[in-house]
Amino acid sequence: MDPNRIGDPTKESLESQIDAWRRHLRRSRALTGRDVEELEDHLREQIASLQADGLSEDEAFLVAVKRLGSVDALTREFAREHSERLWKQLVLAGDSERGGEVGGEGSRRMWVALALAVAAAVAIKLPALFGIDFESESAAFFYPLNIGFLTLPFVVAYFAWERPLATSSRLWLAGAFALAALVVNLFPFPSWAPGVRVPDTLALTALHLPIVLWLGVGVAYVGGRWRGSERRMDFLRFTGEFFIYFVLIALGGGVLTGLTVGLFEAIGYDIEPMVGNWIVPCGAAGALVVATWLVEAKQSVIENMAPVLARIFVPLFTLVLVGYIATILATGRWIDIEREFLIVVDLLLVVVFGLLLYSISARDPLEGPAMFDWLNLVLVVAALVVDVLALWAIGARISDFGFTPNRTAALGMNVVLLVNLAGSAVLYARFLRGGVPVGRLWSWQMTYLYVIAGWAAIVAFLFPPLFGFE
Amino acid sequence: MNINKDLVAASSTPLVLAILAEGDSYGYAILKRVRELSGGELQWTDGMLYPVLHRLERSGLIESRWEESESGRRRKYYRITKAGLEQLAEERRQWTTVDRALRNIWSTLAEFAAAAANPAAATLALRPGPA
């Protein structure tokens, strides 16, 4: 029998055996593609030499693999030698030595991201041409409304470049951004004059608009295929990582600006106006794009941080909330409603919502209930109890306070989150009793994104006219 | 023969360096040479050679290149560097010292054993002081 004949069953089986062995080795992070190639060359030579000694293909393969040592021992040995490989390294521009993506693609992404970051930094300073400096008083009437329009389009542009995004989706997104920008800028808010305070409704619009616009980023992120809760879940994961990266970059930026000011102060040059007007806004705008690109680039390289943080803080927040409720019950102290308390409770609900979202985002959907799921449920229920207590206390005095725009917005957001958490609690309880799969909880949260965005849109676009742009 | 693991590990550096000093080589051939040199007594687990090679490469004692082998596969060849040759000389000095010390004690022990067979001579030989 001719051993080189294509389709020879024994020949194929040796190749497939080597294939399986290679795949097994590739799974270890301690070995790069090059290492495996080197070992494979060794294996093949050994097999050839054993076959020359009269062993059959199968026997030769087994002996050769045995002589190389068990895969576990081998990877352990490589890991000891290349311990740095166990720290997942982010290879920014692609490095062939590590068997990662080779050159081209990776570095092209980096350059496009950097170009867009520079463009965003320029865009945020464009209003200066019309006399609106970032730190000036008049800017307080302009930037809060427009900051999203000056920066987020570049994030969208990155995704539009990077992903296949249908022309219709592109036009739709551009139209939506343009329309929103037009509407909020045509709102007859009082314009700036010395002594005029920024109206509450403007602040509310500024606060809620980014939530709506972020949804536009989401549409670009999923490449226009918004249907299917799995894609939206990915976008949510992206959001968590993006936030963490942005905060980290901001921390670094803080150190940079602090040192800059310190250094220039020493030579008696006042750099602070430059820092406030240029470095901070341009840096922040650029950081948005850079953070986006970083999340994308390291997605498969580095462990997602948001679920890890959620894991750490779920028990801690649960402890605090249960302790809080216990203290209220034990001491009989009633919640003393201050004006700001509703905001605090809203923030609490947002945090709990985030914790829940990110701890279930990292969950294996096929796995059954675990200890941690019970903890999540306790956290959600505790947050609900605190919220109900707060709403009760506010309800009694809402007539004293009156429905100002701020309070209405805070109350509305509270109700939106309350309903979400209540729904989550019910689904979670049913899941823990084995009634429904955890996927139901996901799709509930993913569907609810519409409600949150919808409420944000109502506050951003309808509150100013409803409350007379006050 | 089963050789102590530490000893295998300690001797791997001079062995590999010395084999590469003979000429450029690659993993499988280096192992074959080790087997030849030790008369088949020194058996490494084949795979363990590679982390050793990578360590030496990283510390600059050897360098590697990929080349097409006669079988048409890509193969990683290693070559000893100048620093590697210096290291080899140093290793050689150290191992020679250890070897000399061991040889001395082996021969003393051999005399001892011979003396045990002949106790009268042994007392004289081992207690040379004023009796």
Image: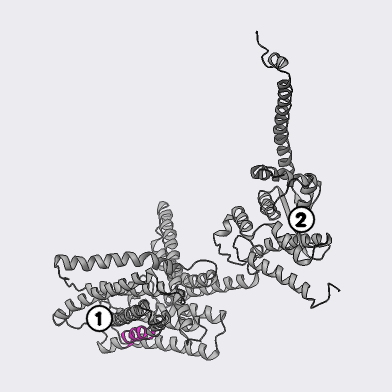
Q: Is residue A177 left or right of residue B52?
A: left
**What residue did someone put label 1 on?**
A411
Q: Residue at x 44, y 61 (%)?
A: A252
Residue A168 position, x and y percent, is 52, 91
Residue A224 position, x and y percent, is 51, 86
Q: Which residues are magenta?
A: A449-461
Q: Residue at x 60, y 63 (%)?
A: A28
Q: Quadrant of residue A320?
A: bottom left
Q: Quadrant of residue A248?
A: bottom left
Q: Quadrant of residue A239?
A: bottom left
Which is closer to the viewer, label 1 or label 2?
Answer: 2
Q: Chain of mark 1?
A: A
Task: Please tell me whether residue B68 is drawn above or below residue A210 in the rendered image.
Answer: above
Q: Is residue A166 left or right of residue B3?
A: left
Dot 2 falls on a residue whose secondary structure is helix
Magenta span contains residue A143: no
Three-letter code, disc 1:
Leu
Residue B88 position, x and y percent, is 73, 41
Which label was assigned to residue B28?
Answer: 2
Q: Is residue B15 left or right of residue A283?
A: right
Determine the residue located farthest toward the right in the rendered image: A2
Q: Residue at x 48, y 70 (%)?
A: A291
Magenta span contains residue A459: yes
Dot 1 falls on a residue whose secondary structure is helix
On the question of residue A72 being in view, the answer is: yes
Q: How is the image coloured?
A: one colour
Q: Chain of mark 2?
A: B
Gap between marks 1 and 2 measured at Cα: 73 Å
